Image: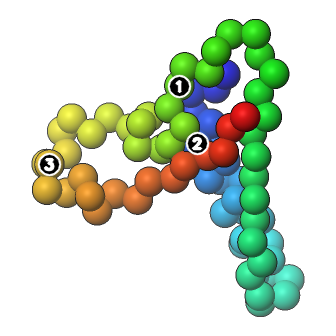
Amino acid sequence: PDKHMPARVMNYDAAAYRYQLTKSKKLYPVLTLVVYYGKEAWNYSRNLLGNINLQKLPEEMRPLISDYKIKAF
């Protein structure tokens, strides 16, 4: 398992959308699935905010940070 997978998937999806915009100027849905075949359990967060250190960020600003969730099986 990769604890940074939510950030990696976000980057893959953004690249796919950027490609669509440069080629057709239209956006179609992008669906990225993470299929994990490892022997040990996936014990890392499946969302971006679960991997970000928010300790120094004021509590009232936390809802303003965009989250990104992955679909991992």
Query: Which callout, 2 or 1, points at the residue further toward the start of the chain?
Result: 2
Q: Amino acid at mark 2?
A: Pro
Q: Residue at x 61, y 46 (%)?
A: 70
Q: Quadrant of residue 64?
A: bottom left
Where's the C terminus, which quadrant? top right
Crowd class of label 1 (few under 14; some 14 to 19; many from 20; radius 10 Å): some
Compute the Cα span from label 1 to label 3.
Answer: 23 Å
Side of 19 relative to 48 (left or right): right
Q: Secondary structure at mark 1?
A: loop
Q: Given the current orientation, which residue lies at the most extreme top position? A: 39
- Residue bearing the label numbered 1: 44
Name the residue located 58 percent from the left edge and 42 percent from the top edge.
Answer: 6
Up-down relation of residue 31 to residue 46 (above or below): below
Dot 3: what SS? helix
Q: Which residue was labeled with disc 2?
A: 6
Q: What residue do we see at 77% from left, 88% from top? A: 26
